[in-house]
Every structure is written in structure tokens, then in C-alpha cells.
Image (spheres, grey):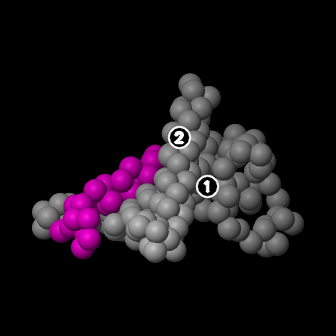
Amino acid sequence: MVDRIDRAMRQLASFLAILGGLALIAVILITVVSVTGRALLFVGLAPIRGDFELVELGTGFAVFAFLPWVQINRQHASVEILTMNMGAGINRLIDLAADLLMLAIAALLTWKHWDGTVDKYVYGETTFIIQYPIWWAYASGLAGAIGFVLVSFWCVVLSARALVTGQDQAHGEIQH
């Protein structure tokens, strides 16, 4: 059962990260086409209308889409000089504490992001140039934020299990 849930969480994190990567590719293409259009105004080309709004949308989504992948693979910044000489039991306790804190942060970010999405939806605010509803951008980021909460919760379960059983857990290619 644990292996199936772990596989599902890793697939969710991977799927969101791939979507985030595709969003960044779209942002790159939009930027290249728009800059090229600006540079070639004299031949009748033009920049993409609202390019910076589309870049903001794609980049915001990508940031939230990558968070579950980073969390499940334990790739957040860490200062291991403090923990590398501590015993395995202490490190498992530190992992659990770090995962609990990350879950709290993920839940807070998601809650406030939800509030922002609802607020933008209620007020019907739109972007300046292309006039798409701003809540769309918030909602796209919310998908990654919810994935972040789910993956963070799963990491807490894995860390608690490792602490109780005394067995190190694998996170991506890192063994803790």
C-alpha cells in the first residue's frame, strides 16, 4: 500500500513538474517571438500583445508546479554541515521536523492562494492589455499549491515511518 501511494505521489509531482516545464518553454517561445517582433518592426512584424502578462501567468504557474517535485525529492536548500556528523536517529527526527514545517508552509501558501483566487474571481479583475481574468492565473498556481500540500503531507508520513521503524527512507537519489 505504501509503495502504491508513494508511486502516485511521485507521479503527481512529476506530472506537475512536466507541466511547469512546458509552461516555461511556452514562456521562452513567447519571449523570443515578441522580442523578434520588436526587433523587426521595420519589416512589418510586431511583438505579441500582452506578452509580459502571459510571461507572468506561465512563470507563476511553473513556480508552484515545481514545488511538489522539489519536496518529494528533498531538493530544498539545506545546511548539512550541521547534521552530517549527527546520528541517523537525530537526522530522522530533523527530517520529520523539517517535513512538518514544510507541510505547514505549504498549507499556509495554499490557503492564502485560495483566498487570493476567490478574491480575484469575486472582483472580476482582469489584466490590463489582453483582459484575461486574473483569477485564471491564480487558479493555475493553485493546482501546484494543492499538489505541494499533498506531497508535503506524504513526506511527513514517510519521515514519521522512518523515525518509528529506524529505517532510512529514499528520496529521489538521496538516502536519508
Towards the viewer: 22 or 94 = 22
Q: Residue at x 55, y 54 (%)?
A: 25
Residue 132 in the magenta stretch? The answer is yes
Reading the image, the residue beneath label 2 is 15
Q: Position of residue 8 (x, y in %)?
A: 54, 33
Category of crowding for the residue at label 1, using alpha-carbon neighbours closer than 10 angstroms: few (below 14), some (14–19), many (at least 20): some
Label 2 SS: helix
Q: How many marks?
A: 2
Rendered position, 111 above or below 167: below
Question: Which numbered marker is on residue 50?
Answer: none
Occupied quadrant, residue 32: bottom right
Any part of residue 2 in sight:
no
> What residue is shown at x 26% (from left), y 65% (from top)?
130
Find the magenta span and give its range: 125-153
Identify the disc placed on residue 70: 1
Which secondary structure class fits the magenta region best? helix
Q: Is residue 113 above or below residue 149?
A: below
**Element type where label 1 sits in the image:** helix
Residue 27 horizontal side relative to residue 97, left or right? left
In the image, taking residue 10 as reference, residue 51 lies left or right, namely left
Split into 4 quadrants, where in the image is the N terminus? top right
Residue 171 appearing in the image: yes
The residue carrying pointer 2 sits among few (fewer than 14), some (14 to 19) or many (20 or more) residues within 10 Å by Cα, namely some
- Amino acid type at mark 2: Phe
Between 34 and 6, the residue placed more toward the observer is 34
Q: Earlier in the sequence, mark 2 or mark 1?
A: 2
